[in-house]
Image (tube, grey):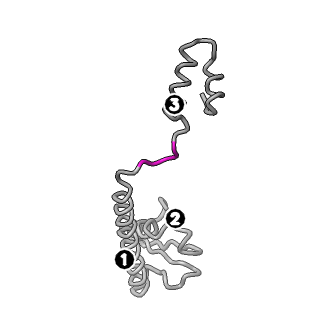
Amino acid sequence: MDDLRPGDTLIIWKIDRLGRSLLDLVDIVTVLEQRGVGVKSLTNGVVDTTTAHGKVVFGMFALMAEDEAALIKERTVADLSAARGRAGGRKPKMTPALINEAQQMYDSRPFTVAEIATSCVVTR
């Protein structure tokens, strides 16, 4: 990628090999286009940023990527607002009664921390 110069065309086997996601792909091709480098896919004939038709198709990809990113953001915000006020994670194993019992065992000193943990069925 660093060796490409203005006027070069990057030939790729499939368009999905250039980026991990549609948004990533759009970013890479946009940067290459700003540098004056075209992109052409051998198996996806419609992706050829060196032609007018190819630029239109890629522009549609860019719009879909932008829409996809906006939808992901919307869903994330909605999920976060729905989750507010709820405690996450699993329920604690140590109940207040078990904590009290473990504290009494610790204070009496004949038990090690490992023995206390074993009796409470928890890790140290």
In the rendered image, the residue lying farthest to the bottom is 53
Which residue carries the number 3 mark? 97
Say what amino acid the circle numbered 3 marks.
Answer: Ala
Depth order, front residue of 49/64: 64
| Residue 6 shows up from this direction | no
Q: Main secondary structure of the magenta part?
A: loop
Real-space Cα separation, disc 1 to disc 2, in angstroms: 17 Å
Asked if residue 89 is among those painted magenta in the image, a careful observer would answer: yes
Picture quarter containing residue 115? top right
The part of the chain drawn in magenta is: 87-91
| Residue lying at 48% horizontally and 81% vertically, measured from the top left | 47
Going from the N terminus, do you reach mark 1 or mark 2 first? 2
Contact (Cβ within 8 Å) of mark 1 with mark 3: no
Query: Quarter holding the C terminus?
Result: top right
Instruction: Find residue 67 and report its horizontal and vertical position in percent.
Output: 37, 74
| Residue lying at 56% horizontally and 17% vertically, measured from the top left | 106
Look at discs 2 and 3 and give the one toward the viewer. 3
Which residue carries the number 2 mark? 20
Going from the N terminus, do you reach mark 2 or mark 3 first? 2
Picture quarter containing residue 28? bottom left
